[in-house]
Every structure is written in C-alpha cells, then in structure tokens.
Image (tube, grey):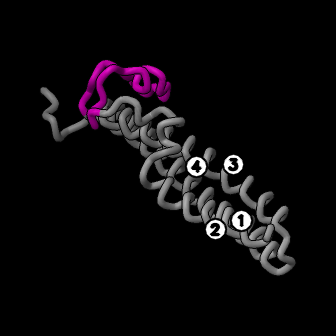
C-alpha cells in the first residue's frame, strides 16, 4: 500500500516528534533568555538610577548584549530545525531516517521559506523579533549612562 501525502509511516512520525521536541526546547530557551535579559538589565538599571551611577548602567548593558546573542543562537537553531521538520514532512532526501544532524539542512542552497541565511545566528541577531525586544532595553541603558554621567 502506498503512503499518501497526509499519511506517514511510524519512522517518519517518530522523526517528526523528535524534531518537534527540539523546536519546543529551543523556543523555551529563547523565551527564558528574554526573561533573564530583562530581569538582569532591570536590576542593574534600577540600581544605577538609585545611585545615579553611570558605570553600573554601563555594566548593565553587558548582560543585555550577552542574552541578545544567546537568544539569536537559539532562534537560529530553531529556524534550522523548523526547516528540518519541513524536509522530513515532505520526505526529502536531505535528512536521513531519524537523523537529528541539522548540518545538511543548514547548508542547503534552498529553504522552504526561500531565505537560506535565516539559520545563520549572525543574521538572526538583527532579526525583527529580537531587535524589537532588545533594542529598547539597550536604549534605556544608554540613556541612563548619558543622564547619570552629566
């Protein structure tokens, strides 16, 4: 009996579950990076406002940048695994049965989204979703540095 596009064999279903589990963990990690980044920066910025200490506000920028980079890493890997999910779902030969090696997907010339560089973490740093979250936090920190310095 031939398998239709909507029916999957047990191996393919298990593979899709494994990939989806990785995607869920990476999404959770990304969410945690945002929470920790905001919390740590808020603590540093709060103490810098209390004491009007520009050095403390400047130090508060470091965790924001670090969490931004970590968040970009998790988001880039999540995008790669989403592409792997599509490849497995469409039964493409890029990914072997039950393989979790994302390198063949990440280095593919064509992605289902049409944008192969979205898996690059350096490109992901400047993605709209991360920039909209982290840029205002950095702006507040820089404003505190300027205000407290004068």
Q: Quadrant of the C terminus?
A: bottom right
Vertical order, 132 against 76 (above or below)? below
Q: On the picture, is 91 further left or further right than 22?
A: left
The magenta-colored residue range is: 90-114
User: Does the CB distance between marks 2 and 1 fall below 8 Å?
Assistant: no
Question: Which image quadrant is residue 90 in?
Answer: top left
Residue 132 at x, y percent in the picture: 47, 59
Q: Which residue is mark 3?
A: 66
- Which element type, helix, strand or loop, lies under badge 2? helix
Which of the two labelled residues, at mark 4 and mark 2, occupies the earlier sequence position?
4
Disc ID at residue 71: 4
Vertical order, 123 against 143 (above or below)? above
- Which element type, helix, strand or loop, lies under badge 1? helix
Question: Which image quadrant is residue 48 in?
Answer: bottom right
Q: Disc 2 and disc 1: Cα gap in Å?
A: 10 Å
Q: Residues within 10 Å of mark 4 (few under 14, many from 20)?
A: many
Q: Which residue is mark 1?
A: 41
Between disc 4 and disc 1, the foreground one is: 1
Between disc 4 and disc 2, the foreground one is: 2
Q: Disc 4 and disc 3: Cα gap in Å?
A: 9 Å
Q: On the picture, is 91 further left or further right than 32?
A: left
Disc ID at residue 26: none
Q: Which residue is mark 2?
A: 140
């Amino acid at each position: 009996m031939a398998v239709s596009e909507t029916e999957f064999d047990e191996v393919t279903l298990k593979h899709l579950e494994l990939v989806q589990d990785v995607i869920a963990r990476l999404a959770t990690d990304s969410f945690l990076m945002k929470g920790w980044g905001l919390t740590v920066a808020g603590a540093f910025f709060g103490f810098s406002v209390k004491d009007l200490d520009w050095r403390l506000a400047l130090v508060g920028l470091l965790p924001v940048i670090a969490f931004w980079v970590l968040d970009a890493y998790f988001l880039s890997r999540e995008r790669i695994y989403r592409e792997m999910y599509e490849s497995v779902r469409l039964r493409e030969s890029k990914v072997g049965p039950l393989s979790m090696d994302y390198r063949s997907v990440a280095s593919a010339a064509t992605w289902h989204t049409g944008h192969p560089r979205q898996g690059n973490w350096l490109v992901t740093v400047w993605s709209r979703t991360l920039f909209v979250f982290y840029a205002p936090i950095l702006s507040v920190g820089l404003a505190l540095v300027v205000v407290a310095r004068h």
